[in-house]
Amino acid sequence: MANNSGLKQIKVSLERIVYQDEENGFTVARADPNGMVEDEITVVGNLPSVFPGQELSLKGYWDHHSEYGRQFKVKDCQIDLPANEAGIKKYLASDFI
């Protein structure tokens, strides 16, 4: 039930990686949408070299997976610098540096 028309843009703080294929970059992750909704969201797509604590600008669309529920399917990802103290701490503690 994919809807490729009308891509949305969201900004999130990456909380944790659930799964990442090192060969092709396919990633399933949990992220905080910075006040968009109360709970973390699931983001899926090609997200190579991302780590918890990073701030991301994502373009994609919302989809509903029959087993895993609502997910944001990423078509484009830009890594932003952390904007708050918690994000900076997670960033510095990650394997990224």
Image: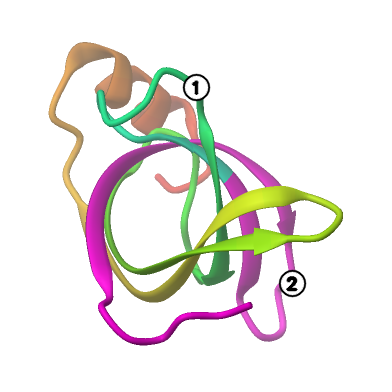
At 49% from the left edge and 47% from the top edge, which residue is drawn?
51
At 81% from the left edge and 60% from the top edge, which residue is drawn?
66
Label 2, secondary structure: give it.
loop
Residue at the top extreme, as displayed: 85
User: Which quadrant of the figure contains the C terminus?
Assistant: top left
Q: Nearer the viewer, residue 40 or 83?
A: 40
Residue 36 % position (x, y): 28, 31
Question: Is 57 rendered above or below residue 84?
Answer: below
Horizontal side, residue 83 vs residue 52: left or right: left
Let me know if residue 13 is in the magenta part: yes
Label 1, secondary structure: give it.
loop
Residue 17 % position (x, y): 64, 45
Q: Nearer the viewer, residue 15 or 8?
A: 8
Mark 1: give few (<14), some (14-19) or many (20+) Cα within 10 Å: few
User: Which quadrant of the figure contains the N terminus?
Assistant: bottom right
Residue 23 % position (x, y): 72, 84
Question: Is 69 rendered above or below residue 84?
Answer: below
What are the residue bounds of the magenta stretch? 1-29
The residue beneath circle 2 is 21
Q: What residue type is disc 1 on? A: Asp
At 41% from the left edge and 86% from the top edge, which residue is drawn?
4
The residue beneath circle 1 is 39
Let me know if residue 35 is in the magenta part: no
